[in-house]
Amino acid sequence: MHDIPAVGNTVLVVDLVEPMLREIPVGIKLIRGGSEEGDVIVDIRSSIYEDGVINTQQELGEGRHLLVVTAEGVQPLKYVYQLRVDMINYAEVFRATIGPVIGLLLITLIGYKLFKSKRFKNWMAAKRKV
């Protein structure tokens, strides 16, 4: 899952790192929605990209999108990348906050146990007498 932080004009760049991919026709399709049955935003026909770079500039709205990269070779290749545009990743938020919350709860529990202990009460009583 790849996150795009804001809606609007977005430049998508696909680098064909493998030298083999630079010698066969490669095309990309950008689809709105979480499946390949969604609305096609852009469909770049298969072509040979000797420089190894495919790019497009599109207006992306909020929600899920799919970027499908297909290579037409002896063995056709298909890569699917899921994009999330301007969406909150609740799993990351949970992971980022769970540590501090558990720490705060432990400190609160230790403080409570300390204030309820007889040793602390005896120490406070001795302080008051002085």
Image (tube, helix red, strand yellow):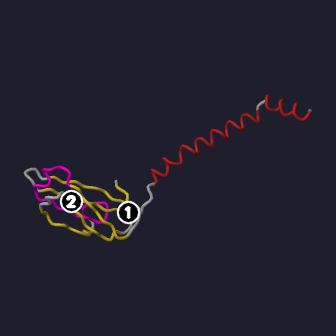
Quadrant for residue 58, please give it.
bottom left
How far from the left and from the top, in percent, is residue 92?
Answer: 45, 50
Which of the two residues, 127 or 35, is positioned nearer the viewer here?
127
- Residue at the right extreme of this rendering: 129
Choose between 127 and 104: the one closer to the eye: 127
Amino acid identity at mark 2: Val
Residue name at image x 84 percent, y 29 percent: 122
Residue 113 in the image, given as x and y percentages of width and height: 72, 34
Residue positioned 34% across, 55% down in the render: 2
Query: Disc count in the image?
Result: 2
* Above-or-below relation of 122 to 27: above
Q: Tell whether 129 sits left or right of 105.
A: right
Height in image: 95 above or below 127? below
| Separation (CA) of disc 1 from disc 2 | 22 Å
- Mark 1 — residue? 85
Residue at (14%, 53%) from the top-left corner?
A: 21
Task: Estimate how packed mark 1 is, as few (under 14), some (14 to 19) or many (20 or more) residues with alpha carbons within 10 Å.
Answer: some
Which residue appears at 22% of the width and 64% of the height? 29
Residue type at tag 1: Val
Looking at the rendering, the stretch of residues picked out in magenta corresponds to: 16-37
Q: Quadrant of residue 110?
A: top right
User: Of helix, strand and loop, which one carries label 2?
Assistant: strand
Q: Position of residue 54 (x, y in %)?
A: 21, 62
Residue highlighted by disc 2 = 53
